[in-house]
Image: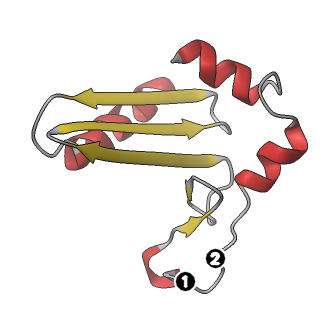
């Protein structure tokens, strides 16, 4: 997965212009009080440029990915059951806090 993400970010899968379009907020005004927007396939945090996330689940399996390109951090969490969403954000924040020290 790391190879895929690096290739994506370096323009080896799609060009940088297409990636910029994917990670642009195409939903201004939707959920402004919740602080996130939507790109093409990504959740965005418009107040903090460079953060992109996507997640999903099926049949008890769950996956979440978050790219923090402004910090050069890539987080990927996989689970075989249960709701990992709360842990994903908490652990992600701990990793970022540690990384920024």
Q: Which of 91 and 83 is in front in this view?
A: 83
**Residue 48 x, y percent position in the rendering:** 62, 57
Examine the rendered structure and indicate whether residue 20 appears above or below residue 101: below
Could you classify mark 2 by the number of other residues whose Cα lies within 10 Å: few (under 14), some (14-19), or many (20 or more)? Answer: few
At 11% from the left and 35% from the top, the residue drawn is: 81
Residue denoted by label 2 = 27
Q: Is residue 65 left or right of residue 40?
A: left
Could you classify mark 1 by the number of other residues whose Cα lies within 10 Å: few (under 14), some (14-19), or many (20 or more)? Answer: few
Callout 2 touching callout 1 (CB < 8 Å): yes
Residue denoted by label 1 = 30
Q: In this view, does 97 lie to the left or right of 63?
A: right
Give the total number of marks visible in the rendering.
Answer: 2
At 29% from the left and 40% from the top, the residue drawn is: 88
Task: Say which quarter of the image contains residue 71.
Answer: top right
Q: Which residue sits furthest front?
A: 59
At 16% from the left and 41% from the top, the residue drawn is: 59
**Residue 14 x, y percent position in the rendering:** 81, 33
At 57% from the left and 69% from the top, the residue drawn is: 37
Task: Say which quarter of the image contains residue 57.
Answer: top left
């Amino acid at each position: 997965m790391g190879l895929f993400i690096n290739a994506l970010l370096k323009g080896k899968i799609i060009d940088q212009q297409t990636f910029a379009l994917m990670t642009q907020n195409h939903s201004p005004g939707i959920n402004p009080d919740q602080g996130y927007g939507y790109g093409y396939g990504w959740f965005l945090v418009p107040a903090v440029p460079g953060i992109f996330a996507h997640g999903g689940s099926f049949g008890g399996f769950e996956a979440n990915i978050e790219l923090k390109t402004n910090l050069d951090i890539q987080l990927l969490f996989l689970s075989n059951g249960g709701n990992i969403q709360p842990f994903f954000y908490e652990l992600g924040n701990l990793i970022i806090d540690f990384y920024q020290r």
